[in-house]
Image (spheres, helix red, strand yellow):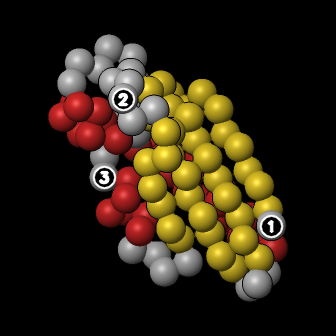
Amino acid sequence: MHIGILTLHISLPGCQSLKEKRQRMGGLHERFGRNPAVAVCESGELDRLEASEWTFVVVATAVPKLESLLSEIEDKIQRTVDGRVMETNRELL
């Protein structure tokens, strides 16, 4: 079993309220949490309106599958979130 941790730091320029922050993040928890191989949480920047940090923990039986899932998450966020990914950290355990 292989485990990967993906942490994304996202900038949300011009965000004015917590409600707007939730709307701009577009339900990441619901979207990615449906996959039984993925756990997701907002892991930082909880008090800042113009930033958000999300961590995804992915489990797979093979490293190529793990890398594929991590890349898929990162790509989907780049396309769907109304913000800019400023930093990406990956850790394989």
Q: Residues within 10 Å of mark 2 (few under 14, many from 20)?
A: few
- Amino acid on which disc 3 is placed: Gly
- Amino acid on which disc 2 is placed: Asp
| Looking at the image, residue 29 lies above or below residue 78 | below
Q: Which residue is mark 1?
A: 93
Which residue sits at x=79%, y=62%? 92
Q: Which residue is mark 3?
A: 27
On screen, residue 16 versus residue 83, left or right, reads left
Q: Quadrant of the N terminus?
A: bottom right
| Looking at the image, residue 74 lies above or below residue 22 | below
- Amino acid on which disc 1 is placed: Leu
Depth check: give the residue in front, 46 or 15: 46
Q: Which residue is mark 2?
A: 47
x then y, percent, for residue 12 = 40, 24
Q: Secondary structure at mark 3?
A: loop
Tell me whether circle 1 and circle 3 mark residues in contact (CB < 8 Å): no
| Looking at the image, residue 60 lies above or below residue 57 | below
Q: Secondary structure at mark 1?
A: loop
Which residue sits at x=30%, y=52%? 27
